[in-house]
Every structure is written in structure tokens, then in C-alpha cells.
Image: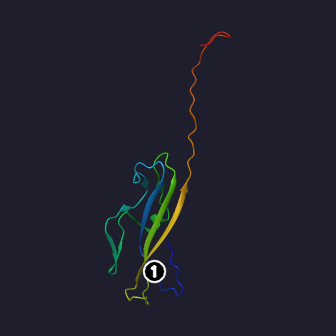
Amino acid sequence: VNEIDIDGSEVVGDDVYVKVELLGDPLDNPDSFSISTGVLQTGLASHRGVDYDVTGFYKMTQAEAAAFVIDPPIHWHGTMKITVASYTEEPEDDDDGDHVKWNLATDDVIVTAIPDEPIITVDDNVGTEDVFF
């Protein structure tokens, strides 16, 4: 997570919040994915008195967010909507005077179904020609 900083005064927060939504078929349980890091949040995250609802987001560090892995349910295919939230501090000034801005970015990842390889098992048989066994 990087900020776009023109004057060099902005600082990105230590924590990153990541939300994963699975949209697709078949999807019996949309929450049945696993994520390699982070703690599932409920309620508000606050920085310098500025709150943001992070319910359903996984809280992680900047380093964890740079390398986390999402493992969708087996045989699932569809769109994985990933939303990342973090805050930026502007110590010099900002529009409302609280010096904090929560930022959100969303990206869709399309997961395509790929059929499993068939497994064929053949037993050894011995017989004569032209006889079914």
C-alpha cells in the first residue's frame, strides 16, 4: 500500500485491512475460503479519532499485506472481489482538520475453472487372444 504524496508529508498507516468477497458458482458457502494472514475484524477501526467500519476485513501489517495468499474453496470459480483499506496521515493539513484520510481500493480477480485430470486405474490381466476378461 503506497500513498500518492506530492509534498512528502503524508504517511501511510501501519495497518492494512483486506476484505475478500467470492462471487460465482458453485458457491454453497461464500465464507469458505482461507487467507494466509490477518485477523477478521468486527466493528470500527480508529486512528486519531477517525473511525472506519472494518467489519468483514482482515487486519494485517503492511508486510503481511504485500505477501498474503487467498485459497478459495475447492472447485470454486468466479470473481474474487478484493478490497483494501488503509489510512493516510497528513500532518501539515487536510480538508477537515483531523489529519487522517481512510483510503479504499477494490480489484476483481477472475478465477477460471480448470477440470481435474482424470485418474484411470487398470488392473493387470492375463488371457488368451479374442477372449474378454
Percent from the top left, x then y, of residue 120? 57, 29
Q: Residue at x 46, y 68 (%)?
A: 84
Q: Residue at x 44, y 59 (%)?
A: 21
Percent from the top left, x then y, of residue 55? 35, 66
Which secondary structure lies at badge 1?
strand
Q: Residue at x 56, y 51 (%)?
A: 112
Q: Is residue 2 above or below residue 57?
A: below
> Closest to the observer: 110 or 48?
110
Q: Quadrant of the C terminus?
A: top right
Percent from the top left, x then y, of residue 51? 34, 76
User: Which residue lies under the disc numbered 1?
Assistant: 11
Name the residue type under label 1: Val
Q: Residue at x 57, y 20 (%)?
A: 123
> How many other residues sit within 10 Å of disc 1, few (<14), some (14-19) or many (≥20)?
some
Colouring method of the image: rainbow
Percent from the top left, x then y, of residue 25? 48, 50
Apparent side of residue 39 relative to residue 24 in the rendered image (left or right)? left
Q: Is residue 123 above or below residue 69?
A: above
> Closest to the observer: 61 or 16?
16
Q: Residue furthest right?
A: 129
Choose top left, top right, bottom left or bottom right for residue 46: bottom left
Apparent side of residue 104 relative to residue 42 in the rendered image (left or right)? right
Number of labelled discs?
1
Q: Is residue 124 above or below residue 54?
A: above
